[in-house]
Image (tube, rainbow, N blue to C red):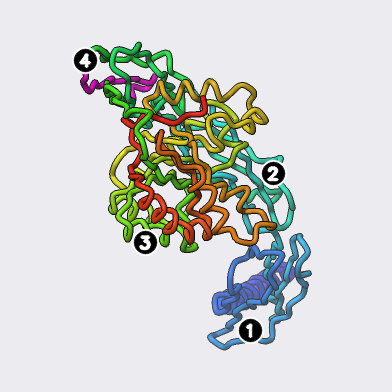
Amino acid sequence: MKNQEIQVKYHLKHKKGLLIGGILFSFFFMGLLLIKFSISFHLNGDMITNISYKDFYQEQGVILKIFGKDFSQQVKIRGEVENGKIGEYPIVYSYSLAFFPMKITRTVKVTDLDAPIIELKGELKQTICPNAVYEEEGYTAYDEYDGDLTDKVEIIEEGNTIKYKVTDSFFNTTIKEREVRKEDKLSPTITLVGGSTIYVKKDSDYKEYGYQAMDGCDGDITDKVEVEGEVDTSKLQTYKVIYRVVDSSGNKQEVERTVIVNEVKTSSPTTPGVIYLTFDDGPSGTGSTAKILDVLKKQQVRATFFVTGSGPDSLIKRAHEEGHVVALHTYTHNYGQVYSSVDAFFADLERIGERVKNITGQETFVTRFPGGSNNTISSKYSKGLMPTLREQVITRGYSYFDWNVDASDAYQCAKASVTDKKLCVYKNVTGGLSKTRSNVVLMHDIKSYTADALNDIIEYAKNAGYTFDVLTTTTNPVRFR
């Protein structure tokens, strides 16, 4: 009985101890929870921070508050970021509070954040022919970290867009685009051999001078040209010949040639005492052409000027307005260029013709070969060319003139050994005149001594009973052949 009482007392005491211990543990646990929920511990910034290898890492720190009190400055920071070196660096933030050790880790990733650079050669917007394949003009790709990535560029074609894509070793991607449209909106061109205006002699055989049609996409499409219009050389009339062509894209072109059938009336080759003063190679901007025009105006004499592509437009305009004939010599006066071929000759002739037309407003078909129609220098560049040119010039409606009186102001009188060049020119001209024929006098208005001699030459001619006139397409030409 006594032992039973002792056991009951023990169990009661034990239960009481357990109860007290449980109560104490509960208070302790609640205290811990209270402390825990009274702590605020977090990072400034992100847990994973990416920075460029070109930048410096700046510590952002943490915020630690316990029961509202700031303990941020007491947090220990361990770890270091090696600036400029690619890699991942852990930064550990820790603080110990009694039974509560606290730790947060930030991962700093030093990486390459910059995308590569793509440079495209050529235009970013282009138009090519519908039947053409775009020929890549080139590109380069470069990354500051990886270096040259050109060989890693991927080309993607999507409709009218070509995309150039490249990705560096850190998966930074750049895409650049080029727009290439396939279309043809340009009309072909038609070039007329012989020019847009042609003079044909009455009752002669008219033949097509020729033409060429070129297209930027189709190339030579001369065989597609349609010609409309007929020329009847038995009638003195102006005719229109139409040339039409259409390229593969439907672009059209049409040009017109004017064919004038005329009857050449020539003056008598034995008209006594007529003088045709002609001047080659001008106009001169140094004063000699202007002086010659002054003398002609004073003497009321008209002359013929075979002009080139040099010199002021104003002098050509003045010569025309004062009643002189502005005729065609050569644009370049470059023998190697002018006499390289038939096409080269007429290209040069048409060019000087355009200059004269633009200045005077009139077309002229009076011309003189550089060096004359019997020159031998042309054979140096194209053997046997001159007979063809003489025939072609006439066929194409031009009238060419040589001379039978030579002032030799560009040769004999120009020599250094000649002390009185003015007198030399005067003697050559006056000594070569004849009253039994027409006199076509060759002079050069680029020579100052020729300008000085002109007034005396005219005075001599007038006193000797000569008359003066200008060369036209109706003048019977003086020709070497």
Q: Position of residue 174 (x, y in %)?
A: 58, 48
Q: Which residues are magenta?
A: 235-251
> What residue lies at 34% left-to-right and 13% top-to-bottom?
206
Who comes first in sequence, dot 2 or dot 1?
1
Is residue 177 shown to the viewer in this render?
Answer: no
| Side of 3 where 161 appears, left or right | left
Query: Which of the two residues, 44 or 9, is positioned nearer the viewer here?
Result: 44
Q: Quadrant of residue 265?
A: top left
User: Where is mark 1, residue-wise?
Assistant: 72
Image x and y of residue 397, in percent: 36, 25
Of residues 437 and 303, the one nearer the viewer is 437
Relative to residue 397, is residue 52 depicted above or below? Answer: below
Q: Which residue is mark 2?
A: 150
The residues bearing labels 1 and 3 have C-alpha atoms spaced at a distance of 104 Å
Q: Amino acid at mark 2?
A: Thr
Q: Quadrant of residue 175?
A: top right
- Asked if residue 460 shows in the view, the reply is yes
Tell which tag, 3 or 2, sits nearer the viewer.
3
Q: Secondary structure at mark 3?
A: helix
The amino acid at mark 3 is Asp
Name the residue that disc number 4 marks: 235
The residue that label 3 is drawn on is: 294
Label pair 3/4, CB-CB below 8 angstroms? no
